[in-house]
Image (cartoon, rainbow, N blue to C red):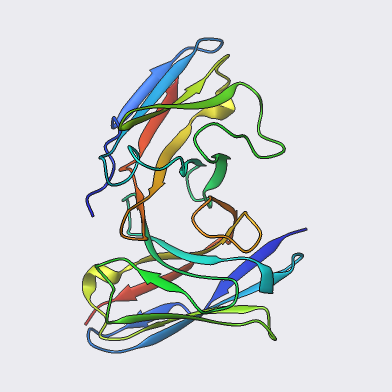
Amino acid sequence: QSALTQPASVSGSPGQSITISCTGTSSDVGVYNYVSWYQQHPGKAPKLMIFEVSNRPSGVPARFSGSKSGNTASLTISGLQAEDEAAYYCSSYTTGSTVVFGGGTILTVL
Amino acid sequence: QEQVVESGGGVVHPGRSLRLSCAASGFIFSSYGMHWVRQAPGKGLEWVAVISYDGNNKYYADSVKGRFTISRDNSKNTLYLQMNSLRAEDTAVYYCAKDWKWEQLFYGMNVWGQGTTVTVSS
């Protein structure tokens, strides 16, 4: 199972919006709505930000949103804040009853 | 407060074995699927294995299939990962994570531990 494809890095200024893409295949992202997004600060454990494509767990700010079109899922962060600077990973359930992660995207807040 | 705490990591020679543990608290452990996820130094997340809430269903990444075994003891609120025939490429921080949905799998991991480090080196 190959990793989902994410851009290595994205950047934005405080207050701006950014979008991170996550491209899979018809064996994962394209056929299941079990796409999740995780935020990881350096030296810390990952944190669930989005589940089932577009749902936010309690406590996650509304400026984090998710969507999906075909084989590509996206995470959008609106109104960027300094504390959003972190690595972001997407994941998806697959037809092989496994989970595949993306390679990760480093978000830099300028 | 939902919490999981991993233990059992260490330095081990190639070909040897190691067993990781994950102690859960603050939630009904016996009602949730549990995952192991690892992260090699400076690399991204890699899913390793999952076990259903009742232990009846287990799934593995191809990279560990046949070498690693996931198990759980619901009476002790503890998840395990038995790792055999370890290789240098198994070197990573190993995280235990809880699936968020009651008695379901693969919906998303909403509780993570701080991880335990496994180093495979001669």
Whether residue B9 is visible: yes
Query: On the image, which quarter does residue A1 sit in?
Result: bottom left
| Above or below: residue A13 compared with residue A76 | above
| Above or below: residue B112 compared with residue A110 | below
For this rendering, which residue is in front, B85 or B55?
A: B55
**Rendered residue at 68%/85% (across/down):** B76
Q: Residue B121: give x, y in percent of width and height.
A: 25, 78
Left or right side of B15 for A86:
right
Residue lying furthest bottom: B16
| Above or below: residue A78 compared with residue B63 | above
Q: State the quadrant of the C terminus of chain A.
A: top left
Q: Residue B111: give x, y in percent of width and height.
A: 62, 56
Q: Residue B54: give x, y in percent of width and height.
A: 59, 77
**Rendered residue at 38%/73% (across/down):** B118
Whether residue A110 is visible: no
Left or right side of A87 for B60:
left
